[in-house]
């Protein structure tokens, strides 16, 4: 009321606000940059998920290869057991006729039991490989889908083509994850690649490691020798304020992680390619050894059956052939496993899948 008792009118008034906090004017692009940064971090997490998936695929492939190799070793052991049982039966008959001594029979029996032990041992390894593969797959596997022997093409991966560019490493999930985090920090990815990523050929004319790849590391030390052009303007203006110490630290961390991912990628590829040549040469020599040992075993068997050589000579040739066959399977497994490793370190292969 006013002085004098005059009554003032009572009114109702509604106030409506426009929600400035929710619909803030983005005059300087801050909200947009925050949205882009969060989106890039989401893509970085997606790259991390793909890295885990790629590792799982490689583990399943290696488990499949191990099962194939162990079943091949089991088959070789069974063949050796059959041959040695036949030799034992022949020695026992000759011993009854007085043609050979009891020592030959004992040696033949020792060879039989050794082969029988190997058959049992490989049977246990096969069962263990199946359990490991089932665990990785996460479901029971139809036995008809499992390999019966070791096929050189079981991995489905061929040798690397010649002249493979290093840009294929940009498909690696860890590098993609680092680039996404750099984008979240408002970095120019083109400038970052130019500064930290050496553009070279990974493979030479025959699919082995190129000379360019070896120059990326110091000779004999395997230390990264590529000098990044850090003077390039990698980070742009915008969300991050250059004057803030925390912002500079975040950018330095993202850049260090990016450089680490690139160096790790080149090192893993270089190591795998270094094994490619040696494993190929080792497999060729092992194949020649198996062929020579097979021929020697055949000749020793003929000479023994005709009475021209003792059983000790035949036993020695059988052992040489058996060991050569085992070494060849081990080398073939190492070669195929190395190709799986190349598939993994190259980010899922070296060419895009066709639709």
Image: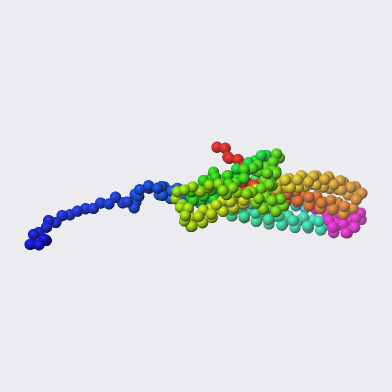
Segment colored magenta: 84-108
Residue drawn at the location 73% of the way across and 49% of the way down? 331
Left or right of 36 on screen, residue 301? right
The answer to whether residue 260 is seen in the rendering is: yes
Residue drawn at the location 76% of the way across and 51% of the way down? 327
Residue drawn at the location 51% of the way across and 53% of the way down? 251
Which of 216 and 155 lies nearest the eye of the viewer? 216
Which image quarter is the C terminus in? top right
Left or right of 185 on screen, residue 272? right
- Whether residue 231 is in magenta: the answer is no
The answer to whether residue 46 is seen in the rendering is: no
Number of numbered discs: 0
- Could you say where residue 284 lies in the image, as x and y percent from the top left? 76, 44
Which of 16 and 147 lies nearest the eye of the viewer? 16
Which image quarter is the N terminus in? bottom left
- Could you say where residue 88 lies in the image, as x and y percent from the top left? 83, 54
- Whether residue 106 is in magenta: the answer is yes
- Residue 203, relative to residue 131: is it above or below? above
Left or right of 270 on screen, residue 246? left
Residue drawn at the location 85% of the way across and 59% of the way down? 106
- Could you say where residue 21 lies in the image, as x and y percent from the top left? 34, 53
Q: Main secondary structure of the magenta part?
A: helix
Which of 27 and 132 lies nearest the eye of the viewer? 27
> In the figure, residue 122 lies in which quadrant?
bottom right
């Amino acid at each position: 009321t006013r002085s004098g008792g005059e009554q003032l009118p009572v009114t109702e008034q509604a106030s409506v606000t426009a929600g400035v906090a929710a619909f803030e004017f983005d005059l300087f692009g801050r909200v947009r940059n925050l949205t882009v940064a969060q989106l890039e971090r989401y893509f970085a997490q997606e790259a991390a998920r793909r890295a885990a998936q790629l590792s799982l695929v490689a583990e399943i492939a290696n488990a499949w290869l191990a099962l194939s190799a162990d079943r091949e070793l089991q088959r070789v052991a069974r063949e050796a057991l059959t041959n040695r049982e036949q030799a034992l039966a022949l020695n026992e008959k000759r011993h009854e006729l007085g043609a050979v001594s009891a020592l030959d029979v004992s040696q033949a029996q020792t060879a039989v039991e050794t082969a029988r032990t190997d058959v049992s041992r490989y049977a246990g390894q096969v069962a263990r490989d199946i359990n490991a593969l089932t665990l990785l797959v996460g479901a029971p596997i139809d036995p008809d889908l499992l390999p019966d022997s070791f096929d050189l093409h079981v991995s489905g991966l061929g040798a690397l083509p010649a002249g493979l560019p290093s840009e294929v490493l940009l498909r690696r999930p860890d590098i993609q994850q680092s680039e996404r985090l750099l984008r979240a920090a408002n970095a120019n990815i083109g400038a970052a690649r130019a500064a930290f990523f050496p553009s070279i050929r990974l493979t030479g004319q025959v699919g082995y490691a190129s000379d360019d790849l070896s120059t990326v590391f110091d000779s004999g030390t395997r230390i990264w020798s590529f000098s990044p052009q850090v003077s390039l303007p990698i980070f742009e203006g915008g969300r991050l304020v250059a004057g803030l110490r925390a912002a500079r630290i975040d950018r330095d961390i993202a850049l260090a992680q990016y450089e680490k991912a690139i160096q790790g990628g080149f090192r893993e590829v270089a190591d795998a390619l270094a094994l490619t040549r040696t494993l190929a040469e080792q497999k060729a020599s092992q194949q020649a050894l198996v062929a020579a040992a097979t021929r020697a075993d055949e000749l020793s068997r003929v000479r023994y059956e005709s009475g021209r050589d003792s059983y000790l000579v035949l036993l020695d040739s059988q052992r040489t052939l058996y060991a050569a066959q085992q070494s060849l399977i081990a080398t073939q497994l190492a070669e195929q496993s190395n190709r799986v490793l190349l598939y993994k370190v190259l980010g899922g292969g070296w060419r895009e899948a066709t639709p």
